[in-house]
């Protein structure tokens, strides 16, 4: 941190650091903060289903689990299909 923000910089409006004034640094800091908030909101919107599903499954542990994630649903359906195929193969072999 010392190499980027050395101590002893005089305070004031027109102090120049790395070629930019204090006002320019404040502008960059403000815009970067606003951009970060926009990215976080966008990220939450993209992953909202996962957030809801994980939260529901976390709070419904031990109870009847009505909250089934799409991924788990697909996995369970795939397992069920495989189980049915194996059962049919076994019944065909017996016949």
Image (spheres, rainbow, N blue to C red):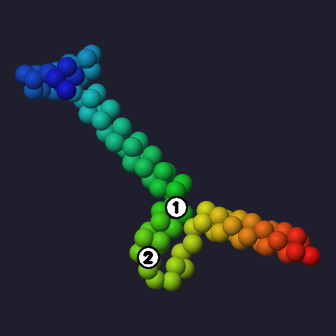
For the residue pair 46 and 65, the one nearer the viewer reads as 65
**Residue 70 shows up from this direction:** no
- Element at label 2: loop
Residue corresponding to mark 2? 61
What number is the disc on residue 95?
none
For the residue pair 49 and 78, the one nearer the viewer reads as 78
- Element at label 1: helix
Q: Which residue lies at the image location 73% right of the left edge and 70% below the top edge? A: 83
From the viewer's perspective, is 57 left or right of 7?
A: right
The residue sitting at the bottom extreme is: 64
Split into 4 quadrants, where in the image is the C terminus? bottom right
Question: Is 50 above or below relative to 35?
Answer: below
What number is the disc on residue 50?
1
* Residue 58 place in picture, x, y as percent: 42, 70
Question: Is 86 above or below relative to 45?
Answer: below
Q: Which residue lies at the image location 26% right of the left edge and 33% below the top edge? A: 26
Question: Is 1 above or below relative to 65?
Answer: above
Q: Earlier in the sequence, mark 1 or mark 2?
A: 1
């Amino acid at each position: 941190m010392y190499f980027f923000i050395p101590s002893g910089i005089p305070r004031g409006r027109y102090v120049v650091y790395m070629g930019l004034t204090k006002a320019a640094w404040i502008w960059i800091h403000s815009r970067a903060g606003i951009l970060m908030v926009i990215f976080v909101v966008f990220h939450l919107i993209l992953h909202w289903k996962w957030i809801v599903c994980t939260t529901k499954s976390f709070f419904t542990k031990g109870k009847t689990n009505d909250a089934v994630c799409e991924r788990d649903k697909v996995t369970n359906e795939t397992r069920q299909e495989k189980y049915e195929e194996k059962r049919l193969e076994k019944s065909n072999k017996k016949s």
